[in-house]
Image (cartoon, rainbow, N blue to C red):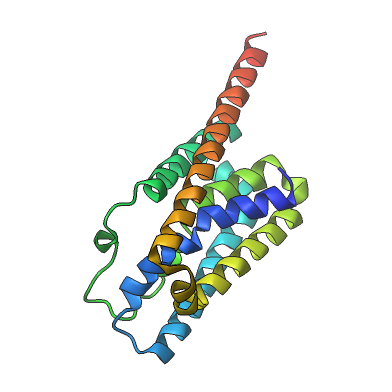
Amino acid sequence: MDFISATILLFMIMDPLGNIPLYQVVLGKLPAERRRYVVIRELVFAYAILCMFLFAGETILGVLGLENSSLSIAGGVVLFLIAIRMVFPAQHGQLVDDNDNDPFIVPLAVPFVAGPSAIAALLLLGSRYPEQMWSWFAALSMAWLAAAVILVGTEPLMRVLGKRGIRAIEKLMGMLLIMVSIQMLLDGFSIYMQSNLSAAL
């Protein structure tokens, strides 16, 4: 895993194109000038949460007594479920509260951007390759910035691509994420088997 692949992975996990209709549903009742402010505010919260998990990942793993193998397997499972939802989307109305016109942190920041799969990926990167922490921070920043540009410019992008174009791109990203999640599962099982074999010998 290097800077470029980590950036692409985090961008796909954040799924800004798939979040466009979700953001529109949640913020549909707000005036246009208020909507942009809320989107930027929630993106900043999401970035702060993701940075916290990136830099405090080793501490969190130590407190919970987790190993790299279990984290890789768990991250792969969560990422697989997220990718399946991207390829075969459910009704988005279940994820929002119609009575909350100006949502705070939930659900726009968490889990739409800073979701469990993004957190798991950052924990995995930080714990397995701690010497590259600043590369992961740069990758996170680049992925978040790209997602932010897309989500802040939601309305022009919807006019250019249309709903069908956005759905096609999201499904393609979902297929790529499925392959990434399978690789994470295989890596986790490989690490687990190697550690057990070393302990047995």
Q: Position of residue 7 (x, y in %)?
A: 66, 55
At horizontal 65% and vertical 43% (from top left) the residue drawn is 127
Outermost residue on the right side: it is 131
Q: Is residue 29 left or right of residue 179?
A: left
Q: Quadrant of the C terminus?
A: top right
Residue 18, above or below 121: below
At horizontal 60% and vertical 17% (from top left) the residue drawn is 196
Residue 30, above or below 184: below
Q: Position of residue 195 (x, y in %)?
A: 63, 21
Residue 156, above or below 96: below
- Figure disc tally: 0
The answer to whether one can see residue 106 in this image is no
Q: Quadrant of the N terminus?
A: top right
Outermost residue on the left side: it is 99
Residue 196, above or below 61: above
Q: Position of residue 95 (x, y in %)?
A: 29, 61
Q: Is residue 2 left or right of residue 40?
A: right
Q: Nearer the viewer, residue 85 or 126?
A: 85
At horizontal 50% and vertical 72% (from top left) the residue drawn is 151
Q: Nearer the viewer, residue 52 or 187?
A: 187
Which quadrant would residue 107 be assigned to in this image?
bottom left
Q: Nearer the viewer, residue 105 or 180?
A: 180
The answer to whether one can see residue 127 in this image is yes
Q: Is residue 98 left or right of residue 71?
A: left
At horizontal 40% and vertical 47% (from top left) the residue drawn is 87
